[in-house]
Amino acid sequence: MAAGKELNPTEYIGHHLTHDAQPLFGEGGFWTLNVDSLSVSILLGFIGLGFLWWIVRGATSGVPNRRQAFVELLFGFVDDQAKGIFKHGDRSKFVAPAALTVFVWVLLMNAMDFLPVDIIAMGTQHVSEHGFRIVPTADVNTTFALALSVWVLMIVFSIQAKGLGGWLHELFFSPFGKWLLPANFLFNLIEYVSKPLSHSLRLYGNMYAGELIFLLLWMLAAAGIGWAGLAFLLGWGWAIFHILIVVLQAYIFMMLTIVYFAMAYEHH
Amino acid sequence: MNINISLFAQAAVFAAFIWFTVRFVWPPLLRAIEARQKQIADGLAAAEKGKQSLEASGKQAEKVIQEARARASEIIGQAEKRDAQMIEEAKSAAKAEGEREKAAAKADIQQEVARAREQLRGQVAALAVAGAEKILRREVDAKAHAELLDGIKKQL
């Protein structure tokens, strides 16, 4: 659409759901970089964490100004969640700040869904003619990157807490005891596989679906002036509902992160 | 839904962001909040202490006032007692003085009476002698009749 020529609905949606994928070597394949997701996520990380850093650098223990009060509210919210779930040592060392990072970053990435895709495309078409997706969390690479990072850290923490022997022992001997060793292993394996999958795909699915519904509504708007009015109303309603989804998914992603870190320290 | 190298790039970015938050964002704010919590706790403790000392000094003041009150009533009691005593003393002194004056006046009067009586007696005696002289028309020997005259004088 942004390219100026008429697109049929499939092409329109396909266009908006195409990544700005740049092959690093030759044909690309696995060695392809989704420049759009990466650049937007880095930008949002800098904005979100940069804002926090800016406020925190001038933080006073006296009467806080409004900006600091806002950041402290966020801090308190994340810290309360971490306090409630993670009871295995000093949460301020890693778990709580990691949870804050996840929450702020994922929230901002999700919130990109609110930006009207076709207006953004007017700018991004100069960068990439073939498509530029501005919701990094609607890219499975992003959500998997986060979920797998958490997963790897979870295993590392688990080994740190229990020792390699303890971790392997748990892998084979719990939850059913030594007589059901293969079942234990299978059980734990499924658990280990399902954790990052459910963690990442939940977020990805929600954001992808949100994006798709917006696209369908904008397509409806292209059908005529009356349809445009309807699409406006529906899009308005969906955007309001989507505020809930955006915040809720960021919250869930953060909570699961804390839960997985906490589980790493738990002995079965 | 293509998994590609973006996943690892994003993971690296994620790691960098977490490191940044752990290192630069969380600790300063935590420090500020904990310092404030300590300040508030200290303030509350100080307020509690102030309240307690206020209570203690209130009790102290109450005690002092009670003592003063007791002392004042004691002093008033003493003063009243002393007052009554003084009045009593003054009364008895006045009474004694009155008695004394009365006695003195009585003595004076008696003296006067006695003197007047003496005078009168002398005059009457002289009058009697003169009368007797006239009656008798003769010389009376004052010396010879002194005893008689004295007897008359005494009878008067």
Image (cartoon, coloured by chain):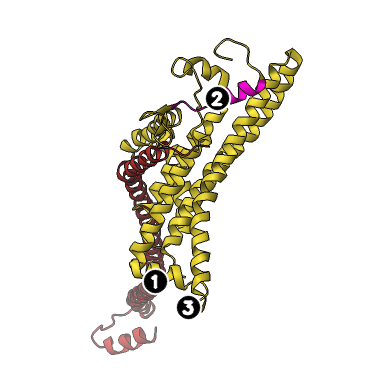
What is the display colour for chain A? yellow
State the residue lying farthest toward the front. A27
Which disc number belongs to residue A178? 3
- Judged from this view, the residue extending furthest toward the top is A4
Q: CA distance from mark 3 to mark 1?
A: 93 Å
Magenta stretch: dominant secondary structure: helix
Residue corresponding to mark 1: B74
Quarter of the N terminus of chain A within the rendering:
top right
Eye-nearest disc, 3 or 2: 3
Q: Which chain is red?
A: B
Give the residue type at disc 2. Leu
Residue B7's disc is: none
Q: Residue under mark 3: which chain is it in?
A: A
Between residues A198 and A112, which one lies in front from this camera angle?
Answer: A198
Mark 2 surroundings: few (<14), some (14-19) or many (≥20) residues within 10 A: few
Q: Which residue is disc 2 drawn over?
A: A115
Name the chain under label 1: B
Indicate the amino acid at tag 3.
Lys
Residue located 59% across and 39% down the image: A206
Q: Amino acid at mark 1?
A: Glu
Residue A237's spot in the image, x, y percent?
68, 29
Q: Residue A88: name its quadrant.
A: bottom left
